[in-house]
Amino acid sequence: MSVEAITIILVLITFAIYTGIGWWSRVNDTSNFYVAGQGVPTVANGAAIAADWMSAASFISMAGLVAFLGYDGTIYLMGWTGGYVLLALLLAPYLRKFGKFTVPDFIGDRFYSSSARSVAAVATIFISLTYISGQMRGVGIVFSRYLQVDIVVGVLIGMAIVGFFALLGGMKGVTWTQAIQYFVIIIAFIIPAVAISLQLTGNPVPQLALTTSDIVDRLGQIQVDLGMTEYMAPFTDLSLLNVFMVTLALMAGTAGLPHVIVRFYTVKSVRAARWSAVWAIIFIGLLYLTAPAVGAFAKYNLIDTIADKPIEEVQSIEWVSKWETTGLLQLDDQNGDGVVNFTGGDDNEVVIDGDIIVLSTPEVANLAPFIIALVAAGGLAAALSTASGLLITMTSAVSHDIYYRIFNKTASEAQRLRVGRITLLIALGIAAYVGINPPGFAGEVVALAFGLGAASLFPVILLGIFDKRMNKEGAVAGIITGLSFTLIMIGAILSPSIIGTEEPILNSFFGINAQGVGVIGMLLNFIVSFIVSRMTPEPPSEIQQLIENVRAPELDEQPEQSVNEK
Amino acid sequence: MKQTLNEKQRWYWKKNIKLILSLLVVWALVGYGGAILLAEPLYHVRFFNVSLSYWIAHQGSILVFILLILIYALRMDKLDKKYKAMLKDGE
């Protein structure tokens, strides 16, 4: 049986499982639609957070980015894990204690203001839409390579499946489906990693093999010999300042991502929120500790297979020719010497899209077709699980925070559910459009969403909990300043791909690139909200009381506290 | 719901803040110190077969982040227990 046939069968089996779970846990009332009735066990919630979190960017792109950035790839490795420390210590327990539906809900109630709620809802929609556009490219790549369909068809199939699951199950269906998807993702990531590790170093544990074998040293030596940068040396691709700033933006952004935060409402107590965070970081850490090994091994294998080899020999390798037809791998014998020159300079003849590193790794290493199919199923699980989480979050921002809480306070459950489902369909349409016409590289776009989260939501949630004096004037001014500064800076630095100017309007913000500029937006947000809040009246006493209450220890695990009671 | 926290609740909140701050200091020292600000000097220190700063940046820091969150959950469980014991003694 061909690789493609096995892939289709495996993907169909996993989809049948997801559908079964979505059907089994289908819901009919809004509280379950958004937060799964707060009855999800911590381990399952942790796995769901991990699957929700680990998107096409983590599964498909990250190891490839690390392979090409070497040391500086730590911006993604640390940035996308270290943020959980902030989330687990500073936000999750208190947001759970506060016990609301959504992030705009917390901000709207804490800052006793509809404008704060709508600003937060708009930030949520912005962040989620930016993020989801990165997922669709992942889906498109997997389908176009393994199902041999056009990328447009691939994206449309993906959107239909995501919409189907989200409409059917709501948050509860998504939570259980995501818990299962996590195991598909992690198995699909680890099995090839172990196989390659064994093959290259004789050690089956990729993390140990990376540290104790001489593979990274050898890779470094080969790269230097070929004229690339030393793999292990810091700051060869990004400056120290940018590594610092992008890491911080990704960390604070992680803590400010509404679709991740909302997960901590789906547990039954503050204690359960803390332990959900523990399980989530363990599950996420497993993939993130494996990715640097996959990156280094894949790079080594790739160079070893194609560098300085006769071009005809290389092009006759099956995986090379298949990826060449997708256009994501290009070989061009520019100097006509019949040999593939893979270097870091102008004489480089290999153009390789980082997004294919993980997907092609099992083929490069000659692993069994079943493993290749497994990786494709894992990539799809990663992209689909994140996309459904984002869709639910966006839907609740519109139907709950904007429609119900601001425009129609007497809306019935059925009306809200209907608005939610209509929003979901519109969001699906936009996401499909963006997926077919991506505005830039997937990784870039995703990292921008984090900058926006860091600059807008993270500071106000943090101050809302830890600064009792923070009032609505401060919060609204802070979000608007942080969000608009970051949007303008991103627009100016990436102007060639966003508004189509010849040259970027701004090269960088004092040396900080577009991915890291959210940190400055975040600092401005903190400063502006602090100053404005001190110059305006303090929050009303019932709000101060509310904050005291959030800080007080929780005596017993509250049984199924209903979030509908206001 | 009380207007302000009572003495025991304030004690609990202070303990909580102290724990958070000490864990965040470790978070910053490892992530931003070891892996970024000290990346150049630690590059010349060997750790098994790789450089120490590379190992921290690609493996060690993630392990530390996992530990920090675990320690927080464990310590807060203990603090909850202590607080409940205090309430009983006070009655």
Image: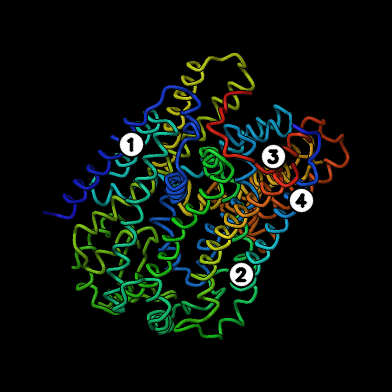
Amino acid type, mark 4: Trp
Image coordinates for residue A21, horizontal then vertical, percent: 32, 36
Left or right relative to A342: residue A114? right
Q: Is residue A558 visible?
A: yes
Res. A156 mark: 1
| Mark 4 residue crowding within 10 angstroms, few (<14) / some (14–19) / many (20+) | few
The image's mark for residue A550 is 3
- Image mark for residue B30: 2
Q: Position of residue B37 (x, y in %)?
A: 65, 73
* For the residues bearing labels 1 and 3, Cβ distance under 8 angstroms: no
Q: Are marks 3 and 2 on the same chain?
A: no
Query: Mark 3 against mark 2, which lies toward the viewer?
Result: 3
> How much space separates mark 3 and mark 4, taking CA atoms?
15 Å
Residue at (22% x, 65% y) in the render: A367
**Marks 2 and 4, how far apart at CA:** 29 Å
Whether callout 4 and callout 1 share a subunit is answered no
Residue A99, above or below A283: above
* Residue that badge 4 annotates: B11
Residue A75: where, in percent of width, then height?
54, 63
